[in-house]
Image (spheres, rainbow, N blue to C red):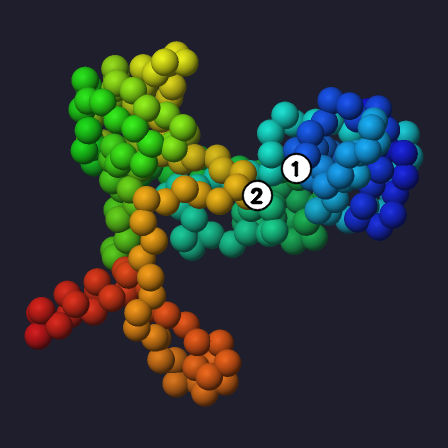
């Protein structure tokens, strides 16, 4: 596949029959991150999420075989990202304060150890949405390690309580389609809504004291904040 036309951040790609809608692609010699937003026969339209200057027709385009996705797991809080979940502190380490193009970085800290407490054990049958472990991400937030929504089966192997990295395999599940590995994080396509069993509707407003915000952009209190307020009231 090659670049056919360039119009600002939008690029036309020829010989693109192997691409699919919303697929993440690497564009040009710089390997810029882009997303397929249209397909007409063998011509694909790609939205590039980085500066396209110096890009030329004829440069290669590579499909990744997956949709534009983000990594969801412990470590999101406290991190600063660009629009495609590249941690800025990692980009600065690789290219300096003037961030270069085509630089890739995993969205979560792969070297940090998290204390994991397991809830499930080997032999248990689980399905999508079940919690198999917990991580105390912050003093007030307990991160629950959940089974991906498309996985169900029997746990044939699971770690013991201890410290692990987000990329380590925590459990193996025997499913109808083979053995699936469960890690501390999940990669999720940004264009697909996360499935939920029940949504908690906001009931109490968060009063900021700023009239412009409270009147035109009202904010509701989250369940976590309400829970902390109840604990404070019980202590008093």
Is residue 138 shown to the viewer in this render? no
**Looking at the rendered structure, which numbered label has been put on residue 76?**
none
Residue 105 in the figure: left or right of residue 173: right
Determine the CA span between mark 1 and mark 2. Answer: 8 Å
Which residue lies most toward the bottom here?
211
Q: Where residue 125 appears, x then y in whole percent? A: 22, 22
In front here: 77 or 150? 150
Q: Quadrant of residue 120?
A: top left
Q: Kindly identify which numbered label has been placed on residue 22.
A: 1
**Residue visible at 38% across and 19% down in the picture:** 180
At 26% from the left and 18% from the top, the residue drawn is 154
Q: What is the total number of numbered labels drawn onto the structure image?
A: 2
Q: Which residue is mark 2?
A: 191
Callout 1 touching callout 2 (CB < 8 Å): yes
Look at the image and tell me in which quarter the N terminus lies: top right
Please tell me which residue is depicted at 26% across the width and 48% down the height of the picture. Answer: 142
The local secondary structure at tag 2 comes to loop
Above or below, 94 against 168 in this view is below
In which quadrant of the rendered view does residue 210 lie?
bottom left
């Amino acid at each position: 596949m090659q670049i056919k036309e360039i119009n600002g951040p939008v690029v036309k790609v020829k010989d693109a029959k192997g691409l699919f809608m919303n697929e993440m692609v690497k564009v040009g010699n710089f390997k810029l991150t882009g997303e397929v937003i249209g397909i007409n026969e063998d011509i694909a339209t790609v939205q590039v999420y980085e500066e396209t200057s110096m890009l030329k027709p004829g440069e290669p385009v590579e499909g990744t075989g997956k949709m534009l996705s983000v990594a969801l797991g412990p470590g999101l809080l406290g991190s600063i990202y660009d629009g495609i979940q590249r941690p800025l502190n990692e980009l600065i380490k690789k290219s300096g304060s003037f961030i270069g193009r085509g630089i890739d970085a995993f969205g979560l800290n792969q070297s940090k150890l998290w204390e994991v407490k397991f809830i499930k054990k080997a032999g248990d049958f689980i399905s999508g949405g079940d919690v198999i472990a917990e991580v105390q991400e912050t003093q007030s937030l307990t991160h629950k390690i959940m089974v991906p929504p498309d996985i169900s089966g029997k746990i044939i192997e699971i770690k013991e309580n201890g410290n692990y990295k987000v990329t380590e395999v925590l459990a193996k599940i025997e499913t109808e389609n083979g053995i699936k590995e469960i890690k501390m994080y999940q990669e999720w396509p940004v264009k697909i809504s996360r499935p939920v069993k029940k949504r908690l509707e906001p009931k109490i407003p968060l009063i900021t004291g700023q009239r412009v915000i409270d009147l035109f952009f009202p904010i509701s209190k989250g369940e976590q904040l309400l829970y902390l307020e109840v604990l404070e009231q019980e202590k008093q």
